[in-house]
Amino acid sequence: MPVGCRRHAADLKFDKRKTQAEARQIEKDFVLRQLNPGDGTVAKTPTSQERFKAERTGRTETPRETPREAVRQAARRSAGDRRSGDR
């Protein structure tokens, strides 16, 4: 890897927005299929500290995942209620 590439890669290492912008530019430069950049609202994955603490306390999921899963289940139940009313 040329030295300039290493330095450029180091500049992008911890800046996700710059990395995404660079990826979009590479897609254009090499005429690759361009992916959607996303809006940054994706759910964050639990950290290793959260997972280890959940293990230590005997939980099956981390505190971050508990409310998320509750909302998913409520949405599924709600969608099921709407479907049964349409029949």
Image: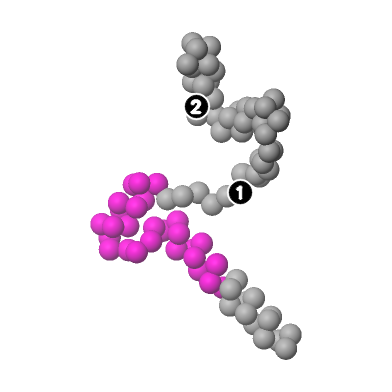
Q: Where is residue 59 shown, x and y percent of the image?
A: 32, 63
**At label 2, which amino acid type do we have?**
Lys
Relative to 63, is 77 above or below?
below
Q: Secondary structure at mark 2?
A: loop
Work out whether residue 35 or residue 61 is closer to the camera in this orientation and state it. Answer: 35
**At label 1, which amino acid type do we have?**
Thr
> Residue at position x 55%, y 29% from top?
15
Residue located beneath label 2 in the image: 13
Q: Does the magenta segment cover residue 59?
A: yes
75 relative position to 66: left or right: right
Work out whether residue 55 or residue 6 is closer to the camera in this orientation and state it. Answer: 6
Q: Where is residue 2 shown, x and y percent of the image?
A: 50, 12
> Residue at position x 34%, y 64% from top?
60
Relative to 61, is 28 above or below?
above
Q: Quadrant of the C terminus?
A: bottom right
Residue at the front extreme, as displayed: 31
Q: Which residues are magenta?
A: 47-74
Q: CA distance from mark 1 to mark 2?
A: 20 Å
> Residue at position x 30%, y 53% from top?
53
Residue at the left extreme, as displayed: 56
60 relative position to 69: left or right: left
Confirm whether residue 46 shows in the render.
yes
Q: Secondary structure at mark 1?
A: loop
Q: Where is residue 61 shown, x and y percent of the image?
A: 38, 61
Residue located beneath label 1 in the image: 41
24 relative position to 19: left or right: right
Relative to 23, is 70 above or below?
below
Q: Does the magenta segment cover residue 71?
A: yes
Q: Where is residue 80 shown, x and y percent of the image?
A: 62, 80
Task: Classify mark 1: residues with Cα within 10 Å, few (<14), some (14-19) or many (20+).
Answer: few
Task: Classify mark 2: residues with Cα within 10 Å, few (<14), some (14-19) or many (20+).
Answer: few
Relative to 36, is 3 above or below?
above
